[in-house]
Amino acid sequence: MDTQIFKPTQDSIKSACDIIKNGGVVAIPTETVYGLFADATKSEACANIFTAKDRPQDNPLIVHISDYDMLKRVALEIPEDAIKLAEAFWPGPLTIILKKTELIPDTTSAGLDTVGIRMPSHPVVLEIISKTGLPLAGPSANRSGRPSPTDAQTVYNDMTGRIPLVLDGGDCNIGVESTVVSLAGDQPVLFRPGYITKAQMEDVLHKEVILSKGITEELSQGEKVLSPGLKHKHYAPKADVIIVNAEFDKYKQLVEDENATALCFDEYADKLNVSSVCYGSVKDSASQAVRLFQALRELDEIGAGRVYAMMPSTEDVGLAVYNRLLRAAAFRVVNL
């Protein structure tokens, strides 16, 4: 299969819509990361996503919609809390898990009776959803286990020969996947942290949002999960990454004594006598989110072996950064 990469013009958007309507898969930018999109209502189309990504079949796909009429088609029940969150954060980087309708096949939801639903804000993906009239399943547009792509060239490098079309909408402005919250039970549960934070949702709902243990702990192989990004190895470069929770002097001593590569904040690169890759400012978790996945890929580009990563904050957007970095490091954290 030849893979083409085009800017999103009316012709290329029409081509993307035609491919999707015929059961194919297209890489499209969103505000979070690039996604692989296909018709969420067709098992065969979603199976093509799993094949392109080499994605485990028990990892559910998020369904993307363009309006509230489409929400009613895919969600069996829409509780008041879902309406409150949607009004506050849609279109945007928030996925809400709800009970699904029969329109969504088991292939899409990994056999669950629930489905994650999101209304993205990027104009290109919204236009394609609207023009096809279809809810679209869309995981990140990378080979399974690799860092998610935030630019079209990275998608092309991962997906060439696997999908027919990549739409190049420039760099993503958030950089980590959407927040995932479940409203399918009695209490809101945060399954994947993102740009929309726990505190922001609690301000809207006026109730506690519980943190899933899978955010910071490795789940057992037998556990079922309601959200992508929890169970399987994710976001990992080929390099051997270890998170270091330490003051800078101790971090510097460790990384220099072992002649490792530093995955560090911008402010510290020129203070280290080893090869380094930066992933944003120590004072700005949002900048870390934008940079993290590209930084993880840069580690492979420079041939890094052992990598010691500076520990990010676990507050607000920092929790999303830590969650992704923790999985890239296979949950290995050194406390000094």
Image (cartoon, rainbow, N blue to C red):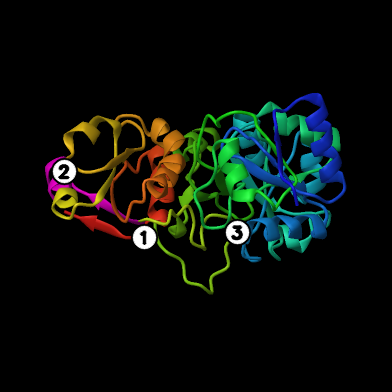
Mark-to-mark CA distance, 2 and 1? 20 Å
Crowd class of label 3 (few under 14; some 14 to 19; many from 20; radius 10 Å): many
Q: Nearer the viewer, mark 3 or mark 2?
A: 2
Which mark sits nearer the N-terminus, 3 or 1? 3
Looking at the picture, does residue 253 appear above or below residue 83? below
Q: Indicate the quadrant where residue 15 lies.
A: top right
Secondary structure, mark 3, is loop
Residue 185 visible? The answer is: yes
Mark-to-mark CA distance, 3 and 2? 36 Å
Check disc 3 and give the amino acid type.
Leu
Number of the label disc, if any, that sits on residue 226: 3
Given residues 161 and 308, the one toward you in this image is: 161
Crowd class of label 1 (few under 14; some 14 to 19; many from 20; radius 10 Å): some
Please state the extent of the stretch shown in magenta in the rendering: 240-253
In the image: residue 36, left or right of residue 293: right
Check disc 2 and give the amino acid type.
Glu
Residue 316 visible? The answer is: no
Q: Where is residue 304 in the image (x, y as percent from the top left)?
A: 33, 51
Number of the label disc, if any, that sits on residue 331: 1
